[in-house]
Amino acid sequence: MKFSISGATHKILSLAVMSVPLTFLILSACGGGGGGGGSAPSPASISATANITAQNLTVGTAMASFSPLTPSGGATPYTYSITSGTLPAGLSLNVSTGAVTGTPTATYATANVVFSVKDANNVVASTTSNVNFTVAAWTVLYSFAGGIGDGSRPDCSLIQASDGNFYGVTNIGGANNLGTVFKITTSGIETVLHNFAGGIGDGSQPYCSLIQASDGNFYGVTNIGGANNLGTVFKITTSGTETVLYSFAGGIGDGANPEGHLIQASDGNLYGLTQTGGAHGWGALFKITTSGTETVLWSFGGTGDGTAPVGSLVQASDGNLYGLTETGGANSVGTVFKITTSGTETVLHSFSGTTADGGYPSPSSSLIQASDGNLYGMTQSWGANGGGMVFRITLSGTESVRWSFGGTGDGASPQGGLIQASDGSFYGMTLVGGANNLGTVFKITTSGIETVLHSFAGGIGDGASPQSGLIQASDGSFYGMTLVGGTNNLGTVFKIN
């Protein structure tokens, strides 16, 4: 018998038959022995990169589009899903793009949501994304009305006093349009305690926060007014009785035009800063007793020194005082300084005013000492994105940038000081930037991860352009003020929890 076989089809092409029994074994031409053809190819694998950034949101504020997973490989199109948990009300997942978007409509206690992705062959990526979502309530507690009956345009921080109420100042408004001291309850009921009158008998235009000293009274400063119209230190009781303790004289022997709030140090005395006056004309650091005896401890503006001190001092765990100047130093864009309670000053850091560092701390800037023992603060300019930065500095003067403001969707030009909240993270505000370019409330972890919690919208329903810091009250919520916005566009007191 003769035959031929096609290797491609395994068909017998020709066969000459003889009367002899034959057995055929046809082998695959595809390589392999045994009986079957080759196996089907496996689907291409799909992988994914997870974004697990916590989403801290506020009711009524649209969130920035967030993509928890970025897939690659496999067969497109991809399909996204939630495999565990539920998104806060008002948010949704686009199953085709993987983006989470929307505007939260209700508060949402921190909870974890798990996202997954699969390809067109229903092959699921082994990587999932586990994201914590939190939605806080945002409340405007009070809108300032201005005029003779109320203050307006607050640009300082609140304090919560021992009676549980909040106290603060406005820069203008009130009976004489020279500013007020006010009290506001946690439910938003406001009372004007004092209308500044100016002239030789009273201060005017306070640019400060109050402090409650160990005697239970409040103390603060006004930028102008008093006997020399160069500012005052005042005391006010919780019932609103005000006393001018000291009128600044300026010149080489005294400071002038104080800003920021006073601190009460461990020796019981009050310490503060003036922006002008002193031996070099560039401001002074002073001490004053609660009975009104004042002493200039340091005059800024000498060779290599900072000029125009801003904000407030902090007494650190080593007993020394630390603060900021807006200008001066090696690069003329501000400094961090240390000063002993006896008046010996040291410049710890001169800001460089570059993309690698900040410059020009804002007039309301202050340092805080965090639980790790380091000092933290902010500058309103420079940094990697040009919008200012958060920095950390050791008590010996080693500085590092923790966050640079001004990126897409971020705030810029931070104002006031940071606070370290009960969760260990830092919280603060920016003057501009955010979704509406009217400022933000932000959170930043100790490792330098920042989240915008609220973008101010202005108008009658929200404040705008905050120029101060936040406080965390005894109820765990944050409270603050905005310079403008609210019902009368004259500023607000707000709460975020």
Image (cartoon, grey):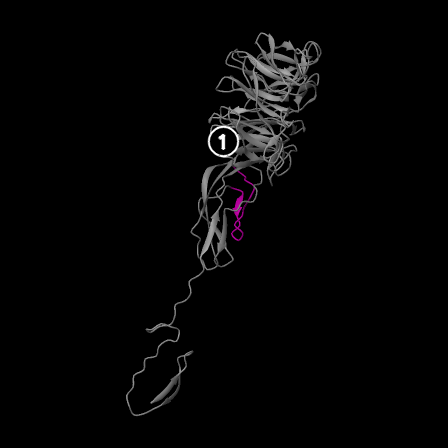
User: In this picture, is 390 found above or below 252?
Assistant: below
Specify the quadrant of the image occupied by residue 12. Answer: bottom left
Given residues 349 and 31, the one toward you in this image is 349
User: Who's the residue at 61% across and 17% down the image?
Assistant: 273
Type of secondary structure dominating the magenta stretch: loop
Q: Quadrant of the N terminus?
A: bottom left
User: In this picture, is 421 found above or below 36?
Assistant: above
Question: Does the magenta-highlighted stretch encompass residue 413?
Answer: no
Q: Position of residue 433 (x, y in %)?
A: 63, 36
Q: Position of residue 36 (x, y in %)?
A: 35, 72
Using the rendered image of the protein, determine whether residue 257 is visible from the camera's viewpoint: yes
User: Who's the residue at 57% across and 42% down the image?
Assistant: 64
Given residues 412 and 235, the one toward you in this image is 412
Specify the quadrant of the image occupied by residue 428. Answer: top right
Question: Circle 1 is placed at which residue position?
Answer: 425
User: Who's the residue at 33% across and 74% down the image?
Assistant: 35
Q: Which residues are magenta?
A: 89-106
Using the rendered image of the protein, determine whether residue 165 is visible from the camera's viewpoint: no
Q: Is residue 308 left or right of residue 25?
A: right
User: In this picture, is 373 found above or below 198?
Assistant: below
